[in-house]
Image (tube, grey):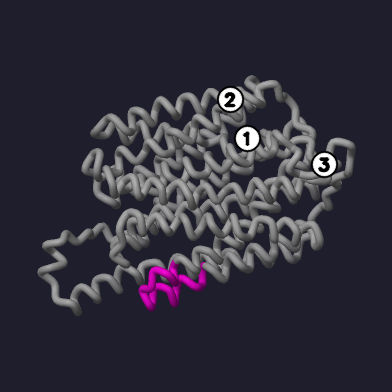
Amino acid sequence: MRNNNTRFAVGLITSLFFLWGFALNLNSILIPHLKKACQLSDFESALIDAAFYFGYFVIAIPAGRFMERYGYKSGILLGLLLFALGAFLFFPAAESRTFGFFLGALFVIASGCTFLETAANPYITVLGDPVEATQRINFAQSFNGLAAMLAPLVGGWVILSGKNLTAADESAMSADELNAYLNFEASAVKLPYVLIGVVVLTVAYFFWKTKLPNISEESSAESAGSIWKEKNLILGVVAQFFYVGAQVCASSFFIRYSYYAAGVGEKTAANYLGIALGAFMAGRFIGTFLMTYVTAARLLAIYSAINIILLLAVISLKGMFSIYALIGVNFFMSIMFPTIFALSIRGLGAKTKQGSSLLIMSIVGGAVFPVIMGRVSDLFNIQFSYIVPGLCFFVIFYFAMKNSHVRGLELGKAH
């Protein structure tokens, strides 16, 4: 039922998309930053993404079961509390400059985000007209895109120092001088993450005080039986696994790639990354509009094919054009996560929470593919390693073609 309470609920749920988008996209800043502060290889720095996205894999099913028993609102509140706790843990992690501590804090943040995504993605699709579900989730995800654009700009400004020591610089410093420099770099994350924790706790307070509409996910013949018999859902889980891997690969090594391909420094590269993620945000709004005229699955297929072509340019070209091509990849990735999600859970009825949990588990692709990409980079170079996300888009294209007949989406109803 569409009413003022439902519209307010849509707005409140949409704020969650911004929060986890901001935290997630700060990883693109943390990778080059902690690479310096903790003296890591490309492979080791990729463990930042691995720790974050592994949290999704471990927590997704427990999150779904928790919400089956206690409801979406309780899951959202628990997710926000875990999110805030992980952010506060960055302070002692920076004090000790222990990479494992940072990874643990990221895992806790990711655990909280898993609860939020498991709740918010299906919740936003069922709050309103089922035919508009794909457009609604893409609109909400647009604020995730806004956060994705702001995170590297803000993070690049307050976290990155712009100073990179060469091997000669390090050898010229005494042990105490080097240790002081590394401690200074590590301490840059303290204030930003404490502030994030405070903001998240504030949002949790508003959720606690707000009555949210209940969601009815009625049983039907279509929703009977094992979740593993839902072939389109399982194909969607595979597609989402490859998509998230591709998305994380494309942005996580953007700063490193910019220096290798065009000699762009880290602070300037962080600004270009902000532009790329701004293109990602714009793509969400534009994609939502285009779905008025083109079916979601068909647009997904077109965007996947374009990204395959753009990544060939990223792999083979040098200079600023290669960076522009990588920015283009971000634009055409924009609709993919919410579209795959909405297409995958269509018609699941009472199994929507289970399906959502599996789709959130598939986010573990963000833990797997960047590590593969980091290893390829160490073996060859950062530019050639972009073949990894390039191959991922073939899987997404296949999923889109298998769903090309879908027009409206039959999801649950809100009341």
Q: Nearer the viewer, residue 205 or 172?
A: 172
Q: Amino acid at mark 2?
A: Leu
Label 1: few (<14), some (14–19) or many (≥20) C-alpha neighbours in 10 Å? many
Give x and y (percent) for residue 37. 31, 66
> Which comes sooner in the sequence, label 3 or label 1?
1
Residue 327, placed above or below residue 21? above
Q: Mark 2 highlights which residue?
A: 299
Q: Mark 1 highlights which residue?
A: 339
Q: Quadrant of the N terminus?
A: top right
Residue at 61% in and 59% down: 58
> Which comes sooner in the sequence, label 1 or label 2?
2
Residue 115, placed above or below residue 264? below
Helix, strand or loop at label 2? It is: helix
Residue at 83% in and 49% down: 215
Q: What segment carries the magenta color?
A: 87-102
Main secondary structure type of the part rendered in magenta: helix
Labels 1 & 2 near each other (Cβ < 8 A): yes
**Looking at the rendered structure, which numbered label has been put on residue 326?**
none
Residue 287 in view in this figure: yes
Q: Amino acid at mark 3?
A: Gly
Q: Mark 3 highlights which residue?
A: 349
Q: Amino acid at mark 1?
A: Thr
